[in-house]
Amino acid sequence: MAEHDGPLDESPVRRPDEAGRVPTRLRPAVPGGRAPDADGASDADAAADGVTAEVVTAGSPMADGTPVGADVPRSDPSEPESGQDEPPAGAAPRAGAPEAAAEPAAQETVLLELARPEDARPDSDSGHDVATHDTVLLTPGHLATRETVLLPPRDDLAHRETVLLSRGRPTGVLRPKGAPLPVAALVNTVWAALQTVLPLLLLTVGARAMEGPVALGLSARVALAGWLLGHGVPLTGPLNEHLATLDLPPLLLTAVALWRLSRAAVHTVRALGAQGSGSIRHAALAAGAVTAVYCGLGVGAAALVDGPGILVTPWRAALNFAVLGLAAAGLGAARSGGVVRRLARQTPLLLRDGIRVGLVATLLVMGVGAGAVGLAVAVNGAEASHRLAEFPGGVLGQIGAVLLCLAYGPNLSAWAASYLLGPGFEAGTLPRTGLPVFAGVPQAPLRGVGWLLTVLPLLGGALAMVLLAHRRLRPRRTRQGDVVLPQPNWLRLAGSAAVGGVVAGLLCAAVGYASGGVLRTTSGALRFGPAIWPMAGMGALVVTLGSLLAVAGVWAFTARPGAKRTASVQD
């Protein structure tokens, strides 16, 4: 490229159809940096598919045969070598200068092909060609002083449509694998079991340390016995100089153990590389491996605990650990592996909404029961404080009593929920155990204002349906960016209310069975806990009624004259 001393000629021209872009018109290089004449400008604008530019390249001969860039002798030695512009084209030559210097040097014409692919830009923008952009001739002398120019965005990217990507990984696609399945299941399951057993061991060691010397073997047996009891494994020990079998699992300990086991299954699925893949096979493999290891740990713990003072049946431990382990590990593996999402997409919306309503309503009913327990203990606070002060063992015994009340708190919540639903529960000899929480056990059915408490489970079912209706009727944004209001399907919502009642009844039966137990002594068996099937029937009836009332209330609220639905789609 020829070097010249004159400034670059750039005339920004704004196109009227594209705001923000400032293209420049292509101008051929002219000695001295002067603007070309009209003929030169028209020649640059005439190219449609390509641009013809006159460029003087180093090494090309001039008109007189002198290479570009070579020293040209001057006729006047007094004339300065640089710093002044040469006379423009067409001007009269200076005195004493040769005739060849008066005329512009012959320049080599180079054709620059700026043709683009036919599919690089949509047809709607066919007039916006690269040839309409002015090319700026850069010289080595001015290249370093040029300012940074913001290039326009690519037109082919600007005209592409937005594509909605699917959530999660495609079905069957696995991530890179980690540890082998046996190793991952063993490590994760053992760690989950230790997270439940170690707190019990620390509490046992701390309690025995306050009384005297600590026997680690006996403390370990007591901690493992509590862990087995949390899984529903009956324990047999001395009670009032007689053997008694206790079968009352503390549900708080059970919930913590199953939660950690579920997390162990999640980590095992990640080790297989099947997280979010939707593979039922890999989820089943992970759940089965974790369950097998957990069942082995339960049998081992039963073998260690079984001895003088505490009797445990190993086969019962194997059965309980297998059932609970498969339930918790299967749920964790299914959620982590994307199986739950895959099955939910294939489930009818009515059934899916009914399951959601039943689950939320059951949780709300159990929460109402927990609130009732707290209210009953607060009302009978004087008696509860008196029982706590008289609990044997001093301060250590009082701490143990509080921990026992917390461990059996979910059991008491289920009993209170059954009481509010109507069937009630059997207390057996539990009120005479001396625990402060049993000071709030009612001695008779509700009377007077207490009947208002029975409305709370009904409100729980109604609230579950209101939450579902809010989920289905909330505004949504389409792919085009429009906000629409779904049109409610009241028949389907009513069907979901009925299905939710059935699901709530089944869940209440399961919770009632898990929260109850039996104390077997030489004089007979004493049962405590809610009546299972009456509780299930009343739970289904109350949740269904509350959900239907909620559907009617939402319909009345949306159909009122002040409610305007400007844009809607069928939900």
Image (cartoon, grey):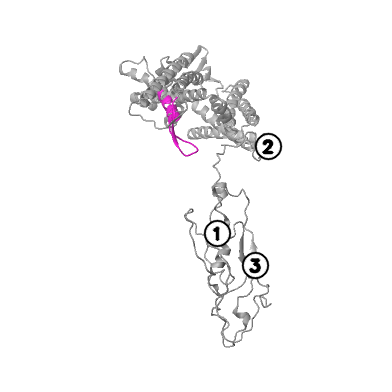
Real-space CA distance between mark 3 and mark 2, rounded to the nearest whole angstrom: 70 Å
Amino acid type shown at disc 1: His
Q: Position of residue 551 (x, y in %)?
A: 41, 22
Q: Nearer the viewer, residue 496 or 479?
A: 479
Examine the image and state in which quarter residue 342 appears: top right
Examine the image and state in which quarter residue 101 appears: bottom right
Against 66, residue 256 (above or below) is above
Label placed on residue 133: 1
Please tell me whether residue 363 belongs to the stretch shown in magenta.
Answer: no
Q: Which residues are magenta?
A: 462-488
Label placed on residue 109: 3
Q: Nearer the viewer, residue 76 or 304?
A: 76
Residue beneath label 2, please?
A: 180
Q: Is residue 98 left or right of residue 514?
A: right
In primary-sequence order, the first of circles 3 and 2 is 3
Answer few, some or many: residues within 10 Å of disc 3's Cα (few below 14, many 20 plus, some between 14 and 19): few
Please tell me whether residue 471 belongs to the stretch shown in magenta.
Answer: yes
Query: Residue at point 65% right, 69% down?
Result: 108
Q: Is residue 169 left or right of residue 400?
A: right
Which residue in the rendered view is the most extreme toward the top? 523
Q: Position of residue 124 (x, y in %)?
A: 54, 47
